Every structure is written in C-alpha cells, then in structure tokens.
Image (tube, rainbow, N blue to C red):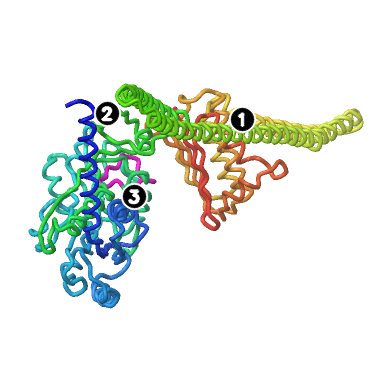
Amino acid sequence: MNFFAARSFFLLAAALLLGASWCGAAAQPELQQKNIVVLHSYHSGLGWVEDVNAGIYKILLAKDQHHLELHMEYMDAQRLDNSDNFQRLRDQLTQKYRSLRFAAVIAVDDIAINFLARFHEEIFPGAATLFCGKIGSQPVDRHGLAGFAGVVEDVDINATLTAGLDLYPHTERIVVINDRSVDGLLLEPLLRREEKRFAPLPFEFLNPASMAELVGMVKELSGNTLVLLGNFTQDEAGGVFTNKRSSWLIASRCKVPILSMWDFYLGSGPLGGRMVSGAAQGERAAKLAMQVIWGDLLAGETKTVTTDNYYAFDYNEMRWFDISYASLPAKSTVTEEPHSVLWKYKKLGWSALGIALALEALVIVLSVLVYRSKKAEASLEEHRSTLEEVVHQRTLELSSTNKVLQNEIEERKRVEAALLDSEEVLHQLSNNLLTVQENERQRISVELHDELGQSLAALKLELRAIVRGFGRQSVAVLQEECEELRSSINLIIENVRRLSRNLSPVLLDDLGIDAALDHLVSHFAKFSGLEADIDLAEINHYFGQNSQRMIYRIVQESLNNMSKHAEATAFAVHIEKRQNRIFLVVKDNGKGFNVEEVFSSISPEKGMGLTAMAERVRILRGSFDIESESGHGTAVHVTIPV
C-alpha cells in the first residue's frame, strides 16, 4: 500500500469514528440530577471535618459532575446531647427532605453512622448508605451495620509507637492521653491492645477531671517519656475543645515528644506518627458514591474499604527535639518546612526548562512531519498553517514564562521594600539608643550634682567648722563633731556604691551571673514587699561575661517594669536548662496590659525598655515573648541556646 492509499484509508476511518461518536452522543440521554447528602457527626470548621469535605468536594464537585447536587448537614454532636438531638434531627431532616429522593447518603464518623443505622429508611428511603471516618479496621457487618458501604480508619497505633521508639530508643514509659467521648471509647480497646504488645514497656493512662488538670499532669513529664495523644475533646468538668486547641493546650506545657495518628494534629504541637488522612477518607467515600451513581455499587450492599496511612512529622517539632531527616521512617512527609523564594522558583525553573525541552522536541517532530508532508503532497498552505499553530503555542508558553518572571521581579521588589523597612527600624532604634544614653548621662549628672555635690559641700563646711573649733571647744565636742563627719562620709560612700552598682553590678563581674541574679531578685523581693517564687538554676559556666551582662539587664528591666507598672502582690523568677536551651521566665499577678498596643506605641519619649530587652535576646540568638492580658498578670518568656 503506497502513502496516498494509506492516507485515504486513515481519513475514511477517522470520518467513520467521528460519525459514530456523534450519533452516540446524540442518542445518549441527558443525565438526570442525582442528590447526595453528607451527614457529619460534628460541626463545620473542625480540621477533620474540613479535610473530609475537601476530599468529597474533589470528587463530587468536579467540573464534569454537573448532574450531581450535594447537600451538607452537621449534627454538632460535640456540643449537643445525642439522646435528644437524634430525635429532633430525625424530625428536621424528614421535614426538610420529604420532597427529594437521594441516590446516596454519606455518614461521617461514628455518631452519624449510628444515627443512619436507626433512621436512614425513614429519612432517606431507597438511598445507598455510605460512611467514612469509622474508627477501627473491622468490617461494618461485624458492627451490626449490614447494608452499609464505606471507609474505616485503620488507626495504626503500632506503627506510630514503633516509629517513636526508633527515634527515642531509650524510652522508659508511654503516657496515653484519651477521653471518655464517643471517639475516645472507641479508641480505648485499640490502645489497650497495644499496651499488651509493647510489654514490658509500661503504659500510663492519664485520667484527668479537667483540661487544666491534664495540662498540669503533662507539665510534670520529663526524662525518657513518650506521649501518645488519642482523643481529648471533652473533659469530665464539661469543657469541650476542638482537636487542634486540645493538642495545642497539651503541647504548650509538655516537655517531651507527643505522637499522634491523625494529620489534623500537625502544626498544633504533636511531633507526628503514622497518620490517617481526613481528605483521603472523604475522597474514598465520594468514589463509592460515584459507584452508586453509575450502578457499580447497589443500595443495601455491604462493603468495607480503608485508606493508606502515611508517616508525617512536623518540622518545627523536629527542630525542637533535635530530630534529623535521616532518622525518620522511609517515605515520611515533613510538614511546615520553610521554603525560601529562591527554592520555590528553582523548582519552577526546572519545570519551565522541562516544558521548553518538551516543546523543542515537539518542534523537531513537527518539522520532520512537515518535511515529509512537503515531499509527499507539496501542500505548502497546510504546512504553513501547522507552523503558525506551533508559533502560536510557543508564543503562549513564552507569555506564561514572562508572567512568571514578572512575578519574581515583584517578589524581589517586595523583599527590597522589607529591607528598607528594616533599615528604618534600625535607624529608629539607633536614635532611641542615643536618646536613652543622653537621658542616662543627664540622670547621673543630676544625681552627682544633687547628692554627691551637696553632700561634699556640706562635708567641707563641717570640716571648716571643726578646724575653727580647735582650741576653743572641748575634746568631747570635737569628737562628737568628728563622729557626725564620719557618718556623713559613710553616707557619701554608700551613695557612690549605689551609683556604681546601677552602672555596672560588682557582683556580676566578681562572682558571675548566678550570684548577681540571686542578689538582684532577693533584694527586689525584700524591698518591694512582694511574695516571691524564686527558682534559679546555675548557668554561670554557659555564658561569657558579655552574655551574662545582657541576661542580668533583661531580668533587671523586667523587675523594674513590674515595680513601675504591674501593681502586683506576688512575682516569680524561674531559670532552668532543658536539653541545649536556657529558659528564663519572669511573671507577676499584676494588672497586665495589651502587648500589641504597648509595642506599637513605643517611642523615645515613652522609653524603650521592652525594645532593649528584645534586642538583647536577639543578640543572644534567643527567642523573646510576652504573655499578658488585662487583669491576669504578665509573663516574660526568654529562651537562649547554649
């Protein structure tokens, strides 16, 4: 068969296929609208709920799913009583959807699944009952839910603990945090099963009556301990917490690593573990719904599937506990990684290069085809059109690349603007420093003039009086006047020493930071009359003289601010060393203040104590934070690496 015969054959075949597809499209009936309802156990806004919704939206709200109508309902079971809520919700949903027919209903989490097990035939007759987020790995028919199809959470506690023990092989005990909510009760047997598997490693199950008590318990944990966070969204005191807030409250006072099994915990304190993904659960449940729509899964059919868990760890927690990438399990995901602009556009550059190479290869292929077509048919017009199309595509790609470059230029301009702002801040800080230096010099000058100058002048007059009294006054009178003169000299010496201590504490230079801080805090407690809680670890050998002086000034400025503004009745100063960091806390029970307002209103006229403290911490390569609220006291937190 020659070239022209082959071309004719392919053109005829293409025409026949096009006609068949056109006829098929014309004969295919328009898809009818299908209704699907998603029933959540909890309320909108929770991290887990929104992750599940994201997976459902990805499948059911895709561009080609115009025939689907998606409805969302939230039981809010975390904040409402289930017994009354079940009956009321049944009546509401029956009334709301009495005129609609549903192809499928998806229950999310165990409370919604139990609700559907009782009422799905009344509210959604004929609809396929699907679910996701069920804790455990057993098939649903073993739970009395025959006729349900869905996705279970195969919570991998074993893999999570194994990974934690690989990272911390010297672990001596596992502390488990779990509540008595519906989810907590479902997790309880799974946690107890792992306790037996990891024997003789001791497991300790915390049973606090309130979140405050739980925070106090984890605050005392130390040493070779790992914490396993199951579920704590409800305490016996009636407190209700979201997962993220619960984990944040626990992690904020916990000094040891926290392991977890759900990825919505990441970013709020836990280190990581073998994770269940809410988005994957929602996506898999939505795919089951699509099987119902297309007839591949029948209503009333029992089916159980699960999703693949994955290892994930929080970058910030890895840094805090000195965990390297190499020590993580294989194929681990690391969240919260910092990426610079250069790194971001490096990837984009490689992608653009790959696209350019692909386009170049396409151009070569098209050139070869054009050459062969010229030899076969000599159809210049057709090939010109093809080349114009190629040029057009290249132009579009170049335009896209140009936009990327423009975005990079704008980003660099923003960085330059930020640098200019930083320069302005440094200039203002320099002006403030000069102002404070000048004010300090003026204060010292006034104090030297008013106190030492006048005291020395009075001393001079007393000496003159004593000299004049020689020969005219008795020895007893002269001795009494000399004693008064000695008292005046002692007072002048004490004033000179006080000025010297304020300028540079002698204890700090002679005995070091431990003795200087102990004297400073004890002296403040004695003369202020405040109730004091002092716990100072020995840190003398960790810092040089300049660093010790900066730490001393930080504590001194904190106490000065407390004395001037706090109106407190008690205060505490704690210094402790954990791993390779020194933690310094100065707090009081005073009236507190709005931190953001105070920092935004700092000016040379109002002083720069807080700014100077923050700058000293920055020089020490540490972190500086102030916690304060009106009526609830103030706490200054300083962390310094050693």
Determine the secondary structure under disc 1.
Answer: loop
- Lateral position of residue 464 relative to residue 489, left or right: right
Residue at the extreme left: 142
The residue that mark 3 highlights is 247
Q: Single out the mark in the foreground, 2 or 3.
A: 2
Q: Residues within 10 Å of mark 3 (few under 14, many from 20)?
A: many
- The kind of residue tagged 2 is Ser
Residue 519 or 207: which is nearer the viewer? Answer: 207
| Residue 285 percent location from the top left of the image | 22, 54
Determine the secondary structure under disc 2.
Answer: helix
- Seen at 91% across and 30% down, the residue is 468
Determine the secondary structure under disc 3.
Answer: helix
Q: Single out the mark in the foreground, 3 or 1.
A: 3
- Seen at 16% across and 67% down, the residue is 117
The residue that mark 1 highlights is 505
Residue 545 or 115: which is nearer the viewer? Answer: 115
Range of residues picked out in magenta: 250-263
- The kind of residue tagged 3 is Ser
Q: Is residue 104 above or below residue 198?
A: below
| Residue 581 percent location from the top left of the image | 42, 32
Q: Which mark is residue 327?
A: 2
